Image (tube, coloured by chain):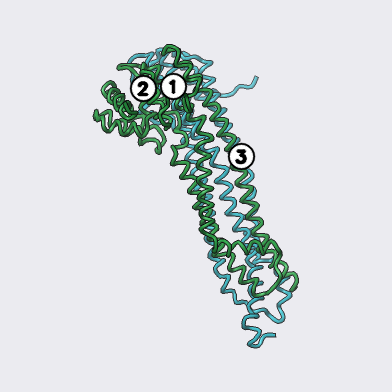
Chain colours: A green, B cyan
Amino acid sequence: MSARDVLARHVAAAIERHRGVAAYLGLVAEAVPPHERGPWRRMAEAVAAGDVAAGVEAARRATACWIPLIASAPGDHRLEARILQAATRPPRGGGPLAALGVALAAVTLSSVLTLLFTTAVLPVFEALFDDFGMRLPWLTRVTLAVGPAARRGWPLAVAAMVLGGLGWWFLVRQAPRRASAAADFTRALARLVAGGVAYDDAIVLAARVADAPPVDPADPARPLTYAAVAALDAPPAAAAVLLDAVADCHDDRARAGSSIGEWFIGPLAVATIGVLVGLAVIALFLPLVQVVSNLS
Amino acid sequence: MPEHPVTTCEQAIAEAVACGGDATRLESLVAEAAAVRRDDRLWLRQTLVYPAAVGVLAILGAAWITARDGVLIHDVQDAFRNPPIPTPRAAWEAFDGVAVSVAVGGLLAAIGLTAWILRLGRRDARSGALAVRCDVLADLAAGDCPVAVGDRLACAIAAEAHAAAPPPALVAHAVARDDVDARASLLRSTAAFYRGLDARRRRALRRAVPTVATCVVGCVVLIYGIALFRPLVGLVDALAAPRDGGAVRGGP
């Protein structure tokens, strides 16, 4: 049975079991931040209408929201608390396209600024210096050489920037998400196992939550860790507790990784841009100061 | 021993305790909320000190240069008074427009940043106050306090102006539960939900504000740079111009 079939079967059962919770899902959708409302609204509408096809489509796009419904029995008084718990967890990274979006935005912005600098600013200074026919400092010569080089080799520069953006996206996607994907996967697995979902199905659904390809417990690969596989040897109640503990460990690692990244990247970017802008300003204004002081 | 007037919050806590609330827990909730607000204010002040200082210096510098009409290079200009230098500045006229555009852009960015911080700050404060309100309601529900009285006391203890507004539908849904245990449990979960939202927004703000503030201050410093160098550039351009035509047509 394919992963989509497993998801469809569980979503259909969840909609049938929890039709009464649609109104509460609507309230949760109103309470979460505006950019996170979509999945909750789609879920509330599908559950209210009993529309399995819409539910499967909504679950395919945001499986994490559906885990409380799939993992709760009819009339379970903890269902609403579980829904709130799922809504509290931030969607990490916003999926693969969000990281790519940030990388593309950075590449576009830097391309526009470089284009502006080389086509609007440098030619004016170049013409000014040519008028005087003076010998320019090496820093100025290097800076002025950027313009023609950029105009001649812009396809290469664009390719380098795109490659840099893709490399950044790869790092963002792989480095911090490895721990966070394992945390999301293991946490969802714990909820599903605690809710009595069969282990095989639970692994398939948890893989969808972490946006990971299907994993085989016989040959564990991230986000399914050896610790999680070992926890699955225990009975469901104990396995859920162990899996929660494993998820906590991965959560801690993800938090540490992201805080190091935040601490490092911001200051590095500010310092690099500051040095480049400072050098450009010195390079362009040094000859002017020389001219004026010589003339006066 | 000096006496201090009893605050609305303290009075509400006393009433809540009479209704079956736990005094220690209620006081710790209020103290925690106040500590979070203090920590936020301190962080914001520390974060904005450097950008604000640079921004103020840049604005003062730009204003001084503008008001004194490029006084820094007047001595240099004086050296060329006789014969007077021609001032065909057509090539650099565009700088005026650029300077104005950058100034307006920087100002708009600064206003936008301030509005955004205020908006997020208000939302954080509302989520934090709602979390305290739900926790107090849960505490009072466990002590069998009537719902209406509990809501009034929770508003007073949360001590936020916007917490006095009607509760959001999510809180109203939890309060409407008939079973006392289920009501208290759901209210605690709702409080954790709002506290989680509060923490997430605070993290997002702490990530974004230094970067945005640095960008805005960068724009302001750019204005300062343009204001400082514009007269110098104009002078050099004027000196360069006679070589093209003025000197041939009858210049010195």
Lower sequence index among marks 2 and 1:
2
Residue A201, numbered circle: 2
Residue at image location 57% in from the left, 30% down from the top:
A256
Label 1 is placed on what type of residue?
Pro
Local crowd at mark 3 within 10 Å, few (<14), some, or many (≥20)?
A: few
Q: Depth check: A243 or B207 in front?
A: A243
Disc 1 chain ID: A
Lower sequence index among marks 3 and 1:
1
Label 3 is placed on what type of residue?
Phe
Q: Tell me the SS state at disc 2.
A: helix
Residue A267, numbered circle: none
- How far apart are the alpha carbons under marks 2 and 3? 40 Å
Q: Tell me the SS state at disc 3.
A: helix
Q: Nearer the viewer, mark 2 or mark 3?
A: 2
Residue that numbered label 1 is attached to: A217
- How far apart are the alpha carbons under marks 2 and 1? 12 Å
Residue A72 appears in which quarter of the rendering? top left
